[in-house]
């Protein structure tokens, strides 16, 4: 098969690209390298367009080339602290418009990255029947992607599937810097001999999901029973204290946790994905428990290249 992966040099995109190539597919990447890195794609065998998707003419770019069998759209501003509303909306939504227009024109199925950010402060477990109530422009941009997808899917003969990822962690996220997962940040702190630091009293929890399960969800989404936007998480909440314990034990370190006051007026204390719909429509079942995912990830971080 021939696949197009936007954002393919990023954390999740590159894991997907390398998995698709391992499965002997032909993969083309579009990535402007704004937060991605070529090192994520060492071993990549396909073609690469270092372009800003929100300004690309996909029809002209891929004119006279064989059509793609599907598009995986991951490209996005992913730093949720970016507050330039116009920039966030232009890059994220306009990039998606271009993918959808191209897909509708050539009847190509699309799998795209949405986000748990659409739920904002909604009560946990977050489920797809809750109304979106994003707290930042990043989450808002993803809720607009879901709107665009819903409209485009009406009357379209192929599927458009959105995956509302929760907190993804795993190999390849290190180039995201401060936007990398809490698991990576805690690992870095502890590795450098510093005490792990979290808000008082570390009982806040998130639905963390290992990137290998996220890649699997993308592949399963190609055979979705119908279009829609579905939660992709582990389906469980893990507290920051449990993360610290798991990393500390795996690394054999004896560092006391440092708790400090949460400076935010509002803070989402708990997230947990309801994954019933993803199970039913995509056949998605996470293979990694969070501790198993962390151990697999630490093995990668501790022994790069193994
Ligand atoms: N990592 C998570 O926990 C998480 C959670 C929810 C949703 N998501 C979504 O998953 C997708 C992948 O995120 P990630 O964690 O791999 O982040 P990432 O920043 O590593 O990947 C995004 C990639 O898109 C590229 N990109 C950004 N804007 C672009 C543009 N206009 N044109 C071309 N390329 C562009 C970046 O260079 C980067 O390589 C994103 O859509 C993100 O919003 C991620």
Image (cartoon, rainbow, N blue to C red):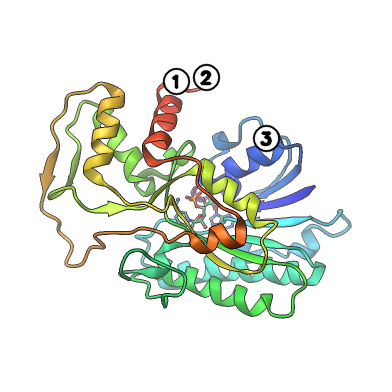
Please tell me whether residue 284 is drawn above or below residue 37 in the rendered image. below
Q: Which labelled disc corresponds to residue 158?
A: none
The answer to which of 208 and 282 lies nearer the viewer is 282
Q: Nearer the viewer, residue 27 or 132?
A: 132
Task: Report if the beta carbon of the residue with label 3 is closer than 8 angstroms to ligand 1.
Answer: no
- The x and y percentages for residue 283 are 60, 54
User: Which is in the foreground here, disc 2 or disc 3?
Assistant: 2
- State the residue position of label 1: 303
Q: Secondary structure at mark 1?
A: loop
Residue 152 at x, y = what percent? Answer: 67, 77
Q: Is residue 6 visible?
A: no
Q: Crowdedness of circle 2 by 10 Å Cα count: few (<14), some, many (20+)?
A: few
> Can residue 131 be seen here?
yes
Which of the pair 280/186 is nearer the observer? 280
Q: CA distance from mark 2 to mark 1?
A: 6 Å
Of marks 3 and 1, the one in the foreground: 1
Residue 232 falls left or right of residue 156: left
Label 2 element class: loop
Name which residue lies at 59% across and 46% down.
216
Image marks 2 and 1: residues in contact by CB distance under 8 Å: yes
All told, the count of numbered labels is: 3
Crowding around mark 1 (Cα neighbors within 10 Å: few <14, some 14 to 19, many 20+) is few
Question: The residue tagged with tag 3: helix, strand or loop?
Answer: loop
Residue hosting label 3: 44
Q: Residues within 10 Å of mark 3 (few under 14, many from 20)?
A: some
**Mark number for residue 306?**
2
Residue sitting at x 55%, y 67%:
229
Ranked by sequence position, the earlier of labels 3 and 1 is 3
Question: Residue 25 in the image: x percent, y percent?
Answer: 76, 41
Residue at left offset 74%, top offset 67%:
103
How far apart, in angstroms, are the residues tagged by discs 2 and 3?
18 Å
Q: Nearer the viewer, residue 7 or 109?
A: 109
């Amino acid at each position: 098969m021939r696949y197009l992966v936007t954002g393919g040099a990023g954390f999740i995109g590159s894991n997907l690209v390398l998995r698709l190539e391992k499965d002997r597919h032909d993969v083309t990447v579009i990535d402007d390298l704004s937060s991605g890195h070529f090192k994520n794609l060492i071993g990549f065998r396909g073609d690469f367009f270092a372009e800003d998707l929100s300004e690309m003419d996909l029809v002209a770019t891929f004119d006279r080339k064989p059509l793609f069998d599907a598009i995986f759209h991951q490209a996005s501003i992913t730093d949720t602290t970016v507050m330039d509303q116009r920039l966030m909306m232009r890059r994220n939504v306009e990039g998606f418009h271009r993918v959808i227009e191209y897909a509708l024109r050539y009847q190509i199925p699309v799998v795209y990255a949405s986000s748990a950010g659409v739920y904002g402060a909604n009560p946990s477990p977050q489920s797809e029947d809750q109304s979106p109530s994003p707290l930042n422009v990043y989450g808002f941009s993803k809720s607009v992607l879901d709107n665009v997808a819903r409209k485009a899917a009406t009357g379209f003969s192929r599927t458009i599937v959105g995956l509302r990822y929760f907190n993804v962690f795993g190999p390849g996220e290190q180039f995201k810097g401060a936007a990398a997962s809490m698991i990576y940040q805690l690992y870095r702190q502890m590795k450098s001999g510093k005490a792990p630091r979290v808000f008082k009293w570390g009982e806040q929890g998130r639905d963390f999901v290992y990137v290998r399960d996220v890649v699997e969800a993308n592949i399963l989404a190609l055979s979705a029973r119908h279009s829609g936007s579905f939660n992709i998480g582990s389906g469980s909440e893990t507290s920051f204290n449990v993360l610290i314990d798991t990393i500390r034990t795996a690394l054999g370190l004896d560092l006391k946790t440092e708790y400090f006051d949460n400076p935010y007026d509002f803070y989402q204390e708990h997230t947990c994905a309801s994954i019933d719909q993803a199970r039913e429509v995509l056949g998605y079942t996470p293979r990694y428990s969070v501790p198993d995912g962390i151990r697999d990830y630490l093995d990668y971080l501790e022994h790069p290249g193994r």
